[in-house]
Amino acid sequence: MHIEAEKKLFTTDDFSKMYEAGILNNDERVELVDGEIIKLNPGKRHVGCSIRATALFTKVFADRACVSIQNPVVIDLHNEPKPDIVVLKFRDDFYAGIEPSPEHALLVVEISDTTLRMDRERKLPKYAKNGVPEYWIEDLNANLLHVYRDPVRNRYKTYFILRPGDSISPVAFPDVSFKVEDLMG
């Protein structure tokens, strides 16, 4: 008889209690994916791209949407990722009264220097399954922007890659256009 050890999966409630108890502190870059606490270690270019996108998105979407930077999106009991950027439907209270969830997201952006595999294989299916209309991954190693649209079950029907020199308009804001280099430098 072969018995395997069982994993203890954490819930979003466990995750919150760890912050409250001081086990995790707010300065740590961690997120909950599939019940596992994932420690993120962004490099300098990642930080630069995050700051660049924050400035750009905040200016462009000023009164039309809420721009959330590295804050949690509660998906389900075992998933509370902290995407680098989420463009949320506008709310007067700026989400002070509720936790953002996939139903509020217009666009999720992950900046990926060390997390490309997780962003594609673990997060993408969750965002699609929960109806996030558009998901971008800034692949810093290949200098590409992966664009996913039209969620169906746990995948996206539309997928394409953009390179420096290419432009894109978010589905929710067709009047706005970004160049890949505006996002990635």
Image: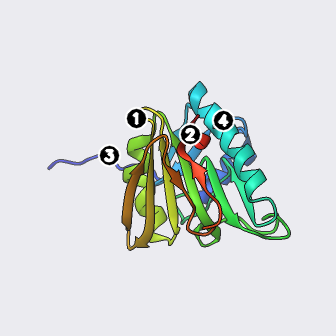
User: Which one is closest to the eye, mark 3 or mark 2?
Assistant: 2
User: Which one is closest to the eye, mark 4 or mark 3?
Assistant: 4
Specify which label sits upstream in the sequence, 4 or 3: 3
Amino acid on which disc 1 is placed: Ala
* Nearer the observer, 132 or 101: 132
Which residue is rendered at x = 63% and y = 51% of the image?
85
- Disc number placed over residue 5 in the picture, else none: 3
Specify which label sits upstream in the sequence, 4 or 1: 4
Q: Secondary structure at mark 4?
A: loop
Left or right: where 140 falls relative to 68: left
Gap in Å between the C-alphas at discs 4 and 1?
27 Å
Specify which label sits upstream in the sequence, 1 or 3: 3
Image x and y of residue 136, in percent: 50, 53
Gap in Å between the C-alphas at discs 1 and 3?
38 Å
Above or below for 24 versus 82: above
According to the picture, the residue beneath numbered tag 4 turns out to be 28
According to the picture, the residue beneath numbered tag 1 turns out to be 142
Q: Residue most toward the right?
A: 92
Image x and y of residue 60, in percent: 74, 55
